[in-house]
Image (cartoon, grey):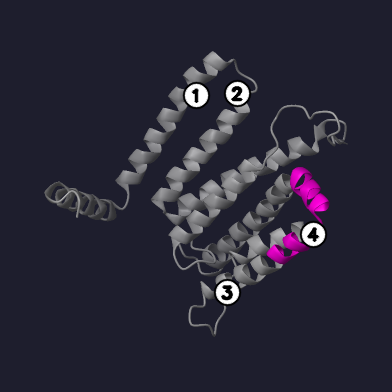
Amino acid sequence: MKYIHLILLLSTCLPPLKGLTDDVLMPKWYGVVMMGMVAATIHLTLPKREDKVYRGRYMGSSLQMVAMLVLTYHLVYALVADVIMRGSPVIKGVFDNPTGFALHTCVLVGVIEANRPSSRPPSMGEAFIEITGRRTIRQVSIILVWILTLLSAVMVFLSGCRTGMVCMAVIILLMFYREMRQRIKPGVMRLWGTVISSGVLLAVVLYVFSVKQESTGGRQFILERTWELIEERPLI
């Protein structure tokens, strides 16, 4: 079943295929619909007991691993296709604009973080395998998650998508908070967590508003006119 998850998630970032009316989006739609039907069929035909065991034990770790593989491909493709081959300063990967690339990157990082095992020791019955007597599979997984997240943040920054930058900043702060609350007293964590989070978010927001000022001004103009219309006719 995890291979179905891999192909399904991989279908969301298929590269452009020539010959279609929309060579960027249509391959993704065809891939997702076809693999979604296969996944639904397997889910419905799988015996209830096996399905329950699978969902209870393997779903989270499977989604994390699959998302990590797809995110790696997603970032490598963008790096090779946009930066190395075309020498373009605009990162868009398998999508037709940087916003699609940044959104997909943030979603994949969110899936990885949501399914990442916690830092607390495993309970009785859980697999706990030592690697070289020092690191566990869980610890290595956490390190890989941080590496992928930081690489994703760099790529989102290079894409120039301002909303993506804010999203990545929030994701990294939440990941940092999750790690630090295991090692720092709650009172100290709340104080310094609030200070650091506020400072980072403020810096990101100030940077976001300092670039693409024409686009920012256009959005501000739209919001002002929209509010004027709401004030004139609140209901309609």
Is residue 19 in view from this perspective? yes
Q: Earlier in the sequence, mark 1 or mark 4?
A: 4
Q: Are marks 1 and 2 in contact (CB under 8 Å)?
A: yes
For the N terminus, the quadrant is: bottom right
Is residue 90 in view from this perspective? no
Residue picked out by circle 4: 46
Give yes or no for residue 46 being in the magenta stretch: yes
Front one among 195 and 150? 195
Residue shown at 59% from the left, 15% from the top: 185
Q: Position of residue 62 (x, y in %)?
A: 73, 50
Front one among 1 and 25? 1
For the C terminus, the quadrant is: bottom left
Give yes or no for residue 74 being in the magenta stretch: no
Q: Earlier in the sequence, mark 1 or mark 3?
A: 3
- Magenta region, residue range: 39-58
| Amino acid type, residue under disc 1 in the picture | Gly
